[in-house]
């Protein structure tokens, strides 16, 4: 795994690089925006860890240049700016994920792994399956045990996101960011309402529930071990 870390704080950069190398990554480092942009355009990286506030050129400018140049390398933005508007700005600039400082390395590693798994779903892979549940991205049809399930557009989007992250814990924040694009207050019960409706459609009439609640964390779509 070839990773670029663009971070001007020496201690933070060393902390990230050391951890990634211990997990098998080949790590390049840049300590300012200009060097980071040059390296990200000149080399092929599997993922880029990008600090938002950098000398010479800020992280969002780097990100916008990458996307204009049609470089689709996954980018995780690191920043002390953690307000919703800051995160929205970073994601709209082309970031794939946004991690607020200070952070635990284990969380950064988990987010890297999730992004890389997401990239494994090729554009021409239309059929996704979890147990006997199937979602066809070309026809927008959903079936379980061969039975067609009629979903509303938002329910379909939620299920598609769960299918993309099958076996992983999906938090309420992840759903808000990816399905609602921050248009709702995190305290709203809109997620609970849609999850309940989705469960009624994909689980209620079947023996084995797939959409499970992970107490204190979120939800997970996975085949029951029972």
Image: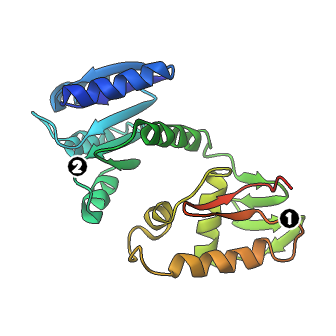
User: Looking at the image, which is closer to me, 173 or 58?
Assistant: 173
Residue 80's mark?
2
Badge 1 element:
loop
Displayed quadrant of residue 2: top left
Picture layout, residue 132 above or below residue 68: below
Residue at x 26% of width, y 64% of height:
85
Q: 10 Å neighbourhood of mark 1: few (<14), some, or many (≥20)?
A: some
Q: 10 Å neighbourhood of mark 2: few (<14), some, or many (≥20)?
A: some
Q: Which residue is mark 1?
A: 208
User: Is residue 41 found left or right of 151 in the rendered image?
Assistant: left
Displayed quadrant of residue 82: bottom left
Picture layout, residue 72 above or below residue 99: above
Q: Which is nearer the N-term, disc 1 or disc 2?
A: 2
Q: Are circles 1 and 2 on residues that touch, CB within 8 Å?
A: no
Residue at x 74% of width, y 53% of height:
127
Residue at x 68% of width, y 50% of height:
167
Picture layout, residue 182 above or below residue 4: below
| Number of numbered discs overlaid on the protein picture | 2
**How far apart are labels 1 and 2 at the CA level?**
43 Å
**Residue 1 seen anywhere in this rendered image of the structure:** yes
């Amino acid at each position: 795994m070839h990773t670029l870390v663009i971070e001007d704080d020496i201690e933070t950069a060393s902390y990230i690089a050391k951890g990634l190398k211990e997990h098998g990554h080949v790590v390049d480092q840049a300590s300012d925006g200009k060097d980071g942009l040059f390296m990200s355009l000149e080399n092929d990286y599997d993922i880029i860890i990008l600090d938002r506030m950098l000398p010479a050129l800020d992280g969002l400018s780097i990100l916008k240049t990458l996307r204009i140049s049609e470089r689709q390398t996954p980018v995780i933005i690191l920043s002390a700016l953690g307000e919703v508007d800051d995160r929205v700005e970073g994601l709209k600039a082309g970031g794939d994920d946004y991690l607020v400082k200070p952070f635990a390395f284990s969380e950064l590693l988990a987010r890297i792994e999730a992004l890389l798994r997401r990239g494994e779903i090729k554009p021409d892979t239309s059929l996704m399956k979890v147990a006997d549940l199937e979602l066809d991205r070309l026809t927008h049809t959903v079936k379980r045990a061969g039975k067609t399930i009629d979903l509303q557009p938002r329910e379909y989007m939620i299920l598609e996101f769960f299918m993309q992250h099958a076996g992983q814990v999906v938090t309420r924040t992840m759903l808000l960011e990816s399905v609602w694009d921050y248009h709702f207050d995190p305290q709203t019960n809109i997620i609970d309402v849609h999850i309940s409706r989705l469960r009624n459609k994909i689980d209620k009439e079947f023996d084995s529930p797939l959409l499970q609640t992970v107490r204190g964390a979120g939800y997970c779509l996975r085949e029951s071990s029972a």
